[in-house]
Image (spheres, rainbow, N blue to C red):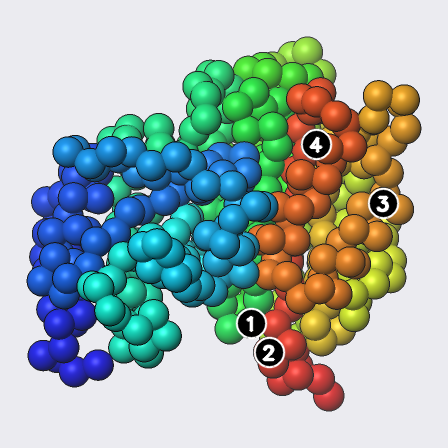
Amino acid sequence: MTATDPWHAALADLLSRSHRLPPDELSAAVNAALRPVGVSAVVYLVDAEQYDLRPLPEPGRPLPEPLSIDASLAGHAFTHVEVHASHGPPPRLWVPVVDGTDRLGLLEVVPPPGADLADGALQDGCRLIAGLVGHLVASKSPYGDVLHRARRSRPMDVSAELLWQLLPPLTFATPDAAISAILEPCYEVGGDAFDYSLDAGTVKLAILDGVGHGLPAVLTTSVALAALRAARRGGADLGATARAVDAAIAAQWQDARFVTAVLAEFDTGTGQLRYLNAGHPPPLVLRRGRAVRALSGGRRLPLGLPDDRLDTASVRLEPGDRLLLHTDGVVEARDPAGDLFGLARLADLAERHIAAGLPSPETLRRLSHAVAAHQGGPLRDDATLLLVEWNRAAASRAEP
């Protein structure tokens, strides 16, 4: 694609418009930039619960109906992060919208009459525009409410509104590692949270579950999350980070409230994993599509409760391994007969989805929906999953 290519010009036009672009004008700006190439588009964003793709409104155009992720060609394009063609009528392309590797939605592209949907230049041009749309959705979301509103099927309560503003993106990947997370329920959360960072080849992870439910639990978890980030960014190791969270919670409340957690550090160059478990369900190691062990070491009391133990556990992962962390709301979800979802079911479903070659975020989406389906109604406790995949190519460099 040369500098004089019309798709390059459309990309440059959209980028130029973006500098002073309010969030509610994103759809209109996309179509204005695409008009010279004879293309129209609708931006769809994935909803908070990841069941539907919801259209972004554009003044003067009728709003299409949401699209089911599990029952549409568009949904297949989203779940597999692949361009798909629909021969209509009218003919169109479904192009994934991502920010980095975080799946945000789809671009529905209607090309000029007679266009070849399999044309490489057309598909490459659409990918370019969709890539910029992904970055714009992520960067413009803090400045208005339209992008947030488009991703919701109903209003959020105060606790959920607070927590979602604190969480990192659901998916992040580098050539060395991929990290994905999901949190349910989306609109009335309790005290679950997750966090991660990657610097100098080290992935630092946390999964948290604050005692109680609703806003009090989220406030406790929020303090814990802020304290662990402050300690981590100050260079603290796992033990010192845990103690910083202990101190932060104790300084705010005297009612023995606490947060269960797993804190971990993973070296993407060597495969070495160090972790600390503060009263939390043990992480699972998935190897060649099988759950091979639960990591039960590094035990201490939940964060916020005094504990002098500073022991951390260590294990070396193998090339291609995945680490699955979860909160108790996953395995303790009960069906109407009272049967637990259970660790064995979680491991079995994870194995199946990995064997099917699904991307990590899609594996977690399906696991989360399986928990909700098992319970047969609204979840009574948060169910959070965090999956880390050590890239096989990067892992091979770490082998002796």
Q: Earlier in the sequence, mark 3 or mark 2?
A: 3
Which residue sits at x=33%, y=36%?
64
Amino acid type of the residue that numbered disc 2 sits on in the rendered structure:
Ala
Q: Nearer the viewer, residue 95 or 263?
A: 95
* Front: mark 3 or 2: 3
In front of the other: label 3 or label 1? 3
Q: Is residue 230 above or below residue 357?
A: above
Q: Residues within 10 Å of mark 1 (few under 14, many from 20)?
A: some
Measured in 3D between alpha carbons, the distance from the residue under mark 2 to the one under mark 4, in whole angstroms, is: 35 Å
Look at label 3 and name its amino acid: Arg
Q: Nearer the viewer, mark 4 or mark 1?
A: 4
Q: Residues within 10 Å of mark 3 (few under 14, many from 20)?
A: some
Answer with the quarter of the image where residue 332 lies. top right
Helix, strand or loop under label 2: helix
Where residue 313 sits, quadrant-wise, is bottom right
Q: Which residue is mark 4?
A: 372
**Which amino acid, by three-letter code, is at mark 4?**
Ala
Rendered position, 81 above or below 181: below
Mark 1–mark 2 CB contact (< 8 Å): yes
For this view, does 199 lie left or right of residue 123?
Answer: right
Residue position marked by numbered label 1 in the rendering: 176
**Mark 1 secondary-structure assignment:** loop
Q: Disc 4 on helix, strand or loop?
A: helix
Q: Which mark is residue 394?
A: 2
* SS class, disc 3: helix
Q: Residue at x 19, y 59 (%)?
A: 39
Disc 4/disc 1 C-alpha distance (Å): 32 Å
Q: Is residue 340 visible?
A: yes
Badge 2 density bin: few <14, some 14–19, many ≥20, Cα 10 Å? some
Q: Please state the horizontal and vertical placement of residue 167, each as a whole percent of the image.
A: 48, 38
CA separation in Å, label 4 and label 3? 13 Å
